[in-house]
């Protein structure tokens, strides 16, 4: 299994465990975070880019698939707001690949894995064309003026989903 950490920083030699900010995790246990390859597209955007992402799983209904995905050849969607289009075109990301042996699954649906030990990447990949990388991975990219309606709706559907950096999203329309 391939595990990655995605960053806009290009020269990270070692990843040390950090205390998580999430309230549902042990505040005394530092973690190194990684993402599995299936969920990697959720992080192929600029760090602070708000996004709604979802992908099919074994329980995804045919009705949801027809309603929320535009092509039979697509299983994954990444939606971002219009204002992030230009930023995304000019962002370079670095994928730090880890040896997976020290990691354990924290959230299978989101693809999150963590390690309590410092990690040295086994490989670093540079991605200069984020849209091209998403398309290469057969991800449908959606551009929306506002993510909130999709966020509310997709949480009621039968996909695995993730809402990232929504604090940076446009305000909800009233």
Image (cartoon, rainbow, N blue to C red):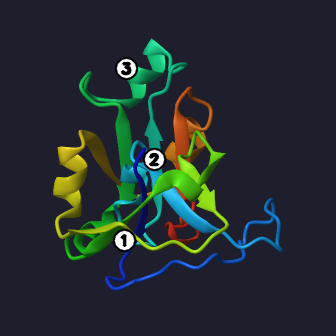
The residue where tag 3 is placed is 66
Image position, residue 135 (x, y; %): 19, 46
Residue 95 visible somewhere in the drawing: yes
Label 3, label 1: how many angstroms apart (C-alpha)? 29 Å
User: On the rendered image, what quadrant is the N terminus found in?
Assistant: top left
The answer to the question of whether label 3 and label 2 lie on touching residues, with beta carbons closer than 8 A, is no
The residue where tag 2 is placed is 53
Relative to residue 151, is residue 29 drawn left or right? Answer: right
Q: Nearer the viewer, residue 65 or 122?
A: 122
Quadrant of residue 45 within the rendered picture: bottom left
Camera-side mark, 3 or 2? 2
SS type, badge 1: loop
Residue 147 visible somewhere in the drawing: no
Relative to residue 22, is residue 100 drawn left or right? Answer: left
SS type, badge 2: strand
The residue where tag 1 is placed is 46
């Amino acid at each position: 299994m391939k595990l990655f950490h995605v960053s806009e920083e290009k020269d990270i030699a070692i990843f040390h465990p950090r205390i998580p900010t999430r309230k549902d995790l042990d505040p005394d246990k530092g973690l190194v975070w990684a993402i599995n390859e299936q969920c990697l597209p959720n992080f192929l955007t600029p760090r602070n880019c708000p996004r709604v992402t979802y992908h099919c799983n074994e329980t995804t209904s045919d009705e949801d698939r027809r309603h929320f995905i535009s092509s039979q050849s697509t299983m994954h969607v990444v939606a971002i707001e219009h204002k992030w289009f230009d930023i995304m075109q000019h962002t370079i990301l670095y994928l730090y690949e880890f040896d997976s042996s020290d990691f354990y699954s924290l959230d299978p649906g989101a693809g999150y894995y963590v390690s309590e030990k410092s990690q040295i990447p086994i490989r670093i990949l540079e991605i200069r064309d984020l849209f091209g990388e998403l398309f290469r991975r057969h991800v449908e990219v959606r551009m929306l003026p506002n993510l909130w309606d999709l966020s509310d709706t997709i949480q009621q559907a039968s996909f695995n989903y993730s809402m990232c950096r929504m604090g940076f999203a446009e305000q909800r329309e009233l």
